Every structure is written in C-alpha cells, then in structure tokens.
Amino acid sequence: MEATCSTSTNMETETPTSGPDASLPPAVIVLGMAGSGKTSFVQRLTSHLHAKGTPPYVVNLDPAVHKLPYPANIDIRDTVKYKDVMREYGLGPNGAIMTSLNLLCTRFDKVLSLVRQRAPQYSMCLMDTPGQIEAFTWSASGSIITDSLASQQPTVIVYIVDSARVANPTTFMSNMLYACSILYRNKLPFIIVFNKADIVKPTFAMKWMQDFEEFLAALDESGSSYTSDLSRSFALVLDSFYANLRSVAVSSMTGEGMVDVEKAIEASIEEYKKDYLPIYEKTMANKKQIDATEMQKKIEALKKEPVLLSMSGDVVENLPIEKMQIEETK
Ligand SMILES: Nc1nc2c(ncn2[C@@H]2O[C@H](COP(=O)(O)OP(=O)(O)OP(=O)(O)O)[C@@H](O)[C@H]2O)c(=O)[nH]1
C-alpha cells in the first residue's frame, strides 16, 4: 500500500466535545444501492452549486471507483490503494472496501479538520460513499464517520433511489424498509432522492408515500402474494416514517430537481437545528469525556479489524496507519 509521511493528530484530541457548531455549512452524506446514481448525483449537484457561485466541498469515500466525474477535494484513493489492500490482506472486493474505509477512519480526524478549516469557502460538504451500501451503512467505520461529522456540524443523509427499480410496489417497499433501517441507525434528518426521473417519473412513488390507499391499490393490481400481504402490513408501520422525511424527484442526467434538492437540504438543516442539535448538545455536555474515550476505543478496535478480515491467515502486525497521509487533492 502506498503510504507516506504521518499526521500526528488523533481522534481523542480532535473529536469536538462541546457539541456541533450549527454555524458551519451542512455535511450531506450520499447513500444508495449500487448503481442508483450516487456518483452522478454528486457530480450534478456539484456542477449546479458551482454554476450558482456557491461551490461545495466534495469528499470521495469510495476506494473502488475507477474514475471520478467530479473534482474531489479529498479522495480516499489518494490515501488508501484499494487494489493493494486486496493483495496485501488477501481480501475480496467487499472486504477490501471495508478495510480501506477502516484504514481511512483511523485518520478521519484529519478529514474532519480539513472540512472544518475550509468551511468559509463552501456551501455544503458532499460525501460520496461506496457502491456497496452495506460497506458504509453497516460497518463500524461508516458509523464513526457519520457520528463524528454529525458531532461537528449539521449533517443530513441523502438516500438515492433508482426510480426505475421501484416501480413495482413490493420492490418499492423493500427499498423503503432499507431506507428506514438507515434512518433508525443514524438518527439524522433524511431525504429520499428519487433519481433517474428522466427514465421513469417517480410521481407514483411519492403518491404511495403520501397516500396509503394509493399504495394498497397498486399492491392489489400487482396480484396477491405473501410479499404483497406483508407489504400491506409494513405500509401501515411506515406511515410515520414517511411523515418524517422529505422526498425529491431528480435526474442526475438532465439536472432536473437540483433546486428542490437544495430546498430539501435547507429544510433538513432547520430540522437538525430544532430537533437534533439540542439532543447532541445535551448528550455531549453530559458525556464529554466518555464520548472521546468511546470514540478512541472504536478506533482501536478498527485497527485490529483488518487482521480479523484477513483470508490469508497471516497476522498483519504493522498496519500502515501511522504512515498514512490525508491531504487535499492537488
Ligand atoms: N438516465 C439516467 N441515468 C443515470 C442517472 N443517474 C445515474 N445514471 C446512470 O446510472 C449508472 C450508475 O450511476 P453511478 O452514478 O455510477 O451510480 P453509483 O450509485 O455511484 O454506482 P456505484 O457507486 O458503482 O454503486 C451510470 O451508468 C449512470 O450514467 C439519471 O439520472 N438518469
């Protein structure tokens, strides 16, 4: 793995303990199933914001992406070489993505500090995540990244859905259940972005979220089955989930809907300030020391994780963490 000189900071000293700074621009974490259009969305929103004269700060957290179609300010690929991780630890593609994120995470304090320093120059900080959604949403590193961002500044989750892939009501339901599980895990303002509106207009999906009867009618049309019966029951439960989120139709291809995305982000930030910030401030005031120690413990555990993941059976004793460098893309 290519690794150069060291940064000397660590999470214990860098994790903010006084609560998030609500005056910082928002961090927007972009999640979604493989191929839903996360990277295209980040590209389109980036160019939309540049055109308005309010550029974003962009961080790529996908170590396996071949080519980035947007200029990233920080790119995980500059720090961790995914192919080297596969080779050195004898890992498959998914294990290597998770290990690369773990490695970056042990130095995420440096990313946080750059994001904080550059705040006067950007309107929002966009975080593009790996194609394999579970590598981020269900990994220790994903939760460290999300928690530490949300502890520093207003943070919103944007969940990208491929509109063409949810035209069937049961597929729609399984996607919404996944979205709900992410909301449940992260407890942050949440926006559902129905992408690829140029291929399939997601008006139907937005109606299903607003009107339970419309969804039931669509299920009836799709015929009776075990999954459609189950979807009926879930639809009742998800009513309150839908009530707590915003949804927007966009096309990352044509640029349609980007103004609505901005509005949804603004409204989510207001929600963050009103409903989430007081909770963060209270929790952090009560547990200042505990939070820093807990975060450090998580990082220490992460440092050992590549060893556990190793398929070769070799004990990897000298991880390149101390030598890793995180800096802005030149
Ligand atoms: N027609 C259309 N195609 C799109 C749109 N957004 C993305 N695509 C296409 O969908 C494919 C996947 O897009 P990506 O942006 O790579 O999706 P991703 O979620 O970042 O992909 P992974 O990170 O590999 O999972 C590409 O072929 C894009 O050109 C859109 O709004 N409309």
Image: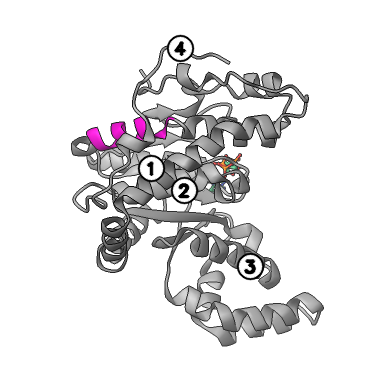
The numbered mark, 4 or 3, whose residue comes first in the sequence reads 4
| Label 2 residue SS | strand
Residue designated by label 3: 172
Tell me the magenta residue range: 107-118
The numbered mark, 2 or 4, whose residue comes first in the sequence reads 4
Residue designated by label 1: 126
Residue designated by label 2: 30
Q: Amino acid at mark 4?
A: Thr
Vertical comparison of 317 with 135: above or below: above
Vertical comparison of 211 with 206: above or below: below
Side of 170 where 259 appears, left or right: left
Q: Does the segment drawn in magenta span residue 115?
A: yes
Q: Amino acid at mark 3?
A: Phe
Q: Amino acid at mark 1?
A: Leu
The numbered mark, 2 or 1, whose residue comes first in the sequence reads 2
Answer yes or no: is residue 3 visible: yes
Camera-side mark, 2 or 3: 2
- Residue 187 appears at what percent x and percent y? 44, 62
Whether residues under marks 2 and 1 lie with C-beta atoms below 8 angstroms apart, the answer is yes
Rounded to the nearest angstrom, the CA distance separating label 4 from label 1 is 26 Å
| Label 1 residue SS | strand
- Residue 302 appears at what percent x and percent y? 55, 36
Whether residues under marks 2 and 3 lie with C-beta atoms below 8 angstroms apart, the answer is no
* Figure quadrant, ligand 1: top right
How packed mark 3 is, by other alpha carbons closer than 10 Å (few <14, some 14-19, many 20 or more), is some
Q: Give the residue furthest to the right.
A: 225
- Residue 135 appears at what percent x and percent y? 60, 43
Residue designated by label 4: 4
Camera-side mark, 4 or 1: 4
Quarter of the image containing the N terminus?
A: top right
Rounded to the nearest angstrom, the CA distance separating label 3 from label 1 is 26 Å
